[in-house]
């Protein structure tokens, strides 16, 4: 509680239709004691070719069955009213925020990344001459972005962990965590 560092404990990578991948993510997060599940919404679509505005229906379905989804604050452009909507939206602002967190967390040894693919991608992640950030030409940065999101969620978004008294014997882990897809 007062000394450990957040660390990657599992990585699932596969190819599924978006709705099935979202359900798989909920299953995995459920296994980890209903971990916080943060789904990147700007890449989610129900079916290829669907209207992007319908992409949240996948998360709307999951919300009925999985209660611990990451919720972001959305401000209506006309009414200026705030509402909570599921999913993490990666954009220029949030990408910089999570990458800055990952850089500081790895530099200060506050986050342990165990996925070798993420570590490899970190080696060729760069700031471009135009000021943007990303992988060098010909390489990917998907794992870096996921790691950065997880580091930010663990270090900046989530409350510090608390000890939960175990009153019932179970075969499941008692660690609280998060999952990001």
Image: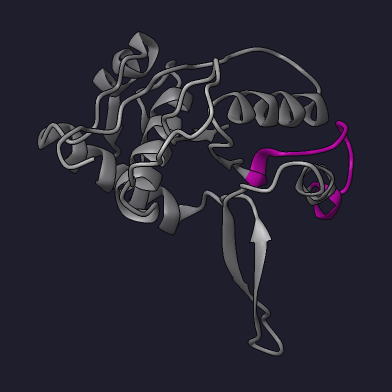
Q: How is the image coloured?
A: one colour
Over which residues does the magenta segment extend? Answer: 41-55
**Considering depth in this image, is 118 or 63 the residue closer to the camera?**
63
Residue 141 placement (x, y as % from top left): 43, 26
Quadrant of image for the N terminus: top left
Q: Main secondary structure of the magenta part?
A: loop
Query: Can the viewer see residue 129?
Result: no
- In the displayed structure, 28 sits above or below 156; it is above
Asked whether 44 falls inside the magenta stretch, the response is yes
**Left or right for 158, reference 34:** left
- At x 29%, y 33%, the residue is 6
**Left or right for 34, reference 132:** right
Quarter occupied by residue 94: bottom left
**Considering depth in this image, is 116 or 5 the residue closer to the camera?**
5
- At x 33%, y 45%, the residue is 161
**Considering depth in this image, is 2 or 114 the residue closer to the camera?**
2
Asked whether 46 falls inside the magenta stretch, the response is yes
- At x 29%, y 22%, the residue is 113
Quadrant of image for the C terminus: top right
Quarter occupied by residue 47: top right
Q: Count every numbered label the image shows and give the total.
A: 0
Taking the view exactly as shown, the residue that stands out farthest to the front is: 167
Taking the view exactly as shown, the residue that stands out farthest to the left is: 108
Residue 72 placement (x, y as % from top left): 57, 61
Residue 5 placement (x, y as % from top left): 22, 33
Residue 107 placement (x, y as % from top left): 12, 34
- In the displayed structure, 126 sits above or below 1; it is above
- At x 85%, y 37%, the residue is 46
**Considering depth in this image, is 35 or 121 the residue closer to the camera?**
35
Query: Can the viewer see residue 87?
Result: yes
């Amino acid at each position: 509680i007062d000394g450990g560092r957040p660390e990657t404990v599992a990585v699932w990578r596969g190819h599924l239709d978006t709705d099935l991948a979202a359900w798989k993510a909920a299953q995995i997060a459920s296994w980890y004691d209903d971990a916080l599940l943060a789904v990147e919404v700007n890449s989610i679509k129900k079916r290829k070719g669907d209207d992007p505005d319908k992409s949240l229906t996948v998360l709307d379905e999951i919300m009925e069955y999985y209660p611990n989804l990451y919720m972001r604050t959305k401000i209506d452009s006309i009414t200026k009213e705030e509402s909570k909507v599921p999913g993490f939206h990666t954009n220029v602002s949030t990408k910089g925020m999570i990458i800055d967190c990952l850089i500081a967390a790895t530099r200060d040894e506050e986050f342990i990344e165990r996925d070798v693919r993420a570590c490899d991608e970190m080696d060729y992640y760069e700031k471009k001459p135009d000021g943007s950030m990303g992988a060098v030409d010909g390489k990917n940065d998907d794992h870096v972005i996921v790691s950065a999101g997880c580091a930010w969620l663990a270090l900046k978004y989530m409350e510090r962990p608390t000890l939960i008294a175990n009153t019932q014997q179970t075969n499941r882990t008692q660690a609280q965590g998060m999952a990001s897809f």
